[in-house]
Amino acid sequence: VWGLSRTIFLPDLPPPYTVSESNLRSTGGHRVSYIGFLPVQGAGGSDEVHASFASERRPRIFWQVSGPPMTRLPFVRKALEIAASLSDECAFVVTEGDPAGSRKPVRVPGGWRYGWCEISKSYFSACDLVVSRAGHGTVAQCVLSSKPSLLVPIPRQTEQEGNAAKAALMRVALVLGQEQLHPGTFRK
């Protein structure tokens, strides 16, 4: 299909700021038109937990988990371990990214946990730091909203590793490997 196309529209920034450049090396040359990031769609809104989080004086960390179940679960465990360990220093909201998960927040040491957060856009806006995987959409959302982020690419997922490396090169994110992610390195 790419070979048959007259114009290929890419929802990314033009070079040298292209986030997904490592995945687009041979996309069609002169036929490529960079159209910028697509606006983030999703629900906003508030609930009691969000209102409390938004007014929190400690640093507010929104931990947005996504990806297939086998990669989500280890990331959720890391999030909950770090939230519990740093509960005196930071306020955490962790969303597990499970579409079949509970929409009701559950209290956990260090903050709150959602199976699926229907108001993630609001948490994203209210936080001081986003911790997430390094999918193109999430990196774009961080850039568009000027949110500092800690990106943890899915291990051995080259697209995410490339996105994270470019975000770090552009100085819009810090990157950690999942195996490096523990309370001590997170605090640093």
Image (cartoon, rainbow, N blue to C red):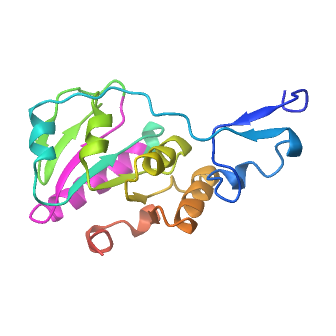
| In the displayed structure image, the side of residue 178 where residue 38 appears, left or right | right
Residue 113 place in picture, x, y as percent = 20, 41
Q: Quadrant of residue 149?
A: bottom left
Residue that sits furthest to the right in the current view: 4
Q: Quadrant of residue 52?
A: top left
Residue 58 place in picture, x, y as percent = 13, 60
Does the stretch in magenta take in 74? yes
Q: Point out the image quarter for the C terminus.
A: bottom left
Of 134 and 15, nearer the camera is: 15
**Which residue is rendered at x = 47% and y = 61% of the image?**
172
Residue 62 place in picture, x, y as percent = 28, 49
Of 186 and 33, nearer the camera is: 33
Of 120 and 30, nearer the camera is: 30
Q: How many marks?
A: 0
Residue 89 place in picture, x, y as percent = 13, 66
Q: Is residue 188 above or below residue 55?
A: below
Q: Which residues are magenta?
A: 72-98
Q: Point out the image quarter for the N terminus.
A: top right
| In the displayed structure image, the side of residue 46 where residue 175 appears, left or right | right
Does the stretch in magenta take in 35? no
